[in-house]
């Protein structure tokens, strides 16, 4: 590129000015996290995935603007053990969960879950809907 000395000087001044800039915030900006786990969900059950019969504009917007995890393999054939694996990152039997009812769905109290880690990172956490992973405190 062939720059005259005035253009070059202006460019260098601009670079120096930008190099001296810094953000005036010390606040750490964290993204919002919404984890949606659905029982009996077929891959094309929402319009974002191609369903032409059911319109799901709010879920579609989340899918378009967010991060989607599309390759989760369940560790068991039932919802509670699978949910325990997702929440802890561990094989469901190691979490104490081996069924769906009558206490077989309780994650051991000493297990660290995604929610525990999120709370430590400053997030407010909550659950909504079906739980089946023990008594929520």
Image (cartoon, helix red, strand yellow):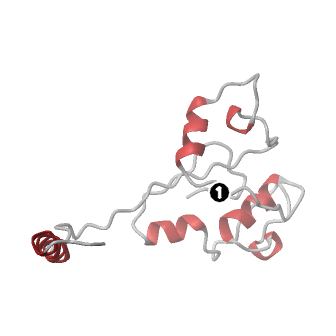
> Where residue 94 appears, x then y in whole percent?
78, 77
Give the side of residue 76 with respect to residue 82, left or right. Answer: right
Q: Nearer the viewer, residue 98 or 89?
A: 89
Instruction: Classify 10 Å Cα crowding around label 1: few (below 14), some (14-19), many (20 and above).
Output: few
Residue in view at x 22 percent, y 70 percent: 26
Question: Can residue 103 be seen here?
Answer: no
Q: Position of residue 95 (x, y in %)?
A: 74, 72
Q: Position of residue 130 (x, y in %)?
A: 68, 45
Q: Determine whether the residue tagged by mark 1 lies in a helix, strand or loop.
A: loop
| Residue 9, above or below 71 | below
111 vs 44, nearest the viewer: 44
| Image quarter hosting the C terminus | bottom right
Is the N terminus in the top left, top right, bottom left or bottom right quadrant?
bottom left
Name the quadrant containing residue 18.
bottom left
Frontmost residue, 19 versus 117: 19
Name the residue rendered at 70%, 72% in the picture.
89
Question: On the picture, is 131 further left or further right than 13?
Answer: right
Q: Residue at x 39, y 62 (%)?
A: 30
Residue 76, by quadrant, is bottom right
Q: Is residue 134 visible?
A: yes
**Which residue is denoted by mark 1 in the rendering?**
135
């Amino acid at each position: 590129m062939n720059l005259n000395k005035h253009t070059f000087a202006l460019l260098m001044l601009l670079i120096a000015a930008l190099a001296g800039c810094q953000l005036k915030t010390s606040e750490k900006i964290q993204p919002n996290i919404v984890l949606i786990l659905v029982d009996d969900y077929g891959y094309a059950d929402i319009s974002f995935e191609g369903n032409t019969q059911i319109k799901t504009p709010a879920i579609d917007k989340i899918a378009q603007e967010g991060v989607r995890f599309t390759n989760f393999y369940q560790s068991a054939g039932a919802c509670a053990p699978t949910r325990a694996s997702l929440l802890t990152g561990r094989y469901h039997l190691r979490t104490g969960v081996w069924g769906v009812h009558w206490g077989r769905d309780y994650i051991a109290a000493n297990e660290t879950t995604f929610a525990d880690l999120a709370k430590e990172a400053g997030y407010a956490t909550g659950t909504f809907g079906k739980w089946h992973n023990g008594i929520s405190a």
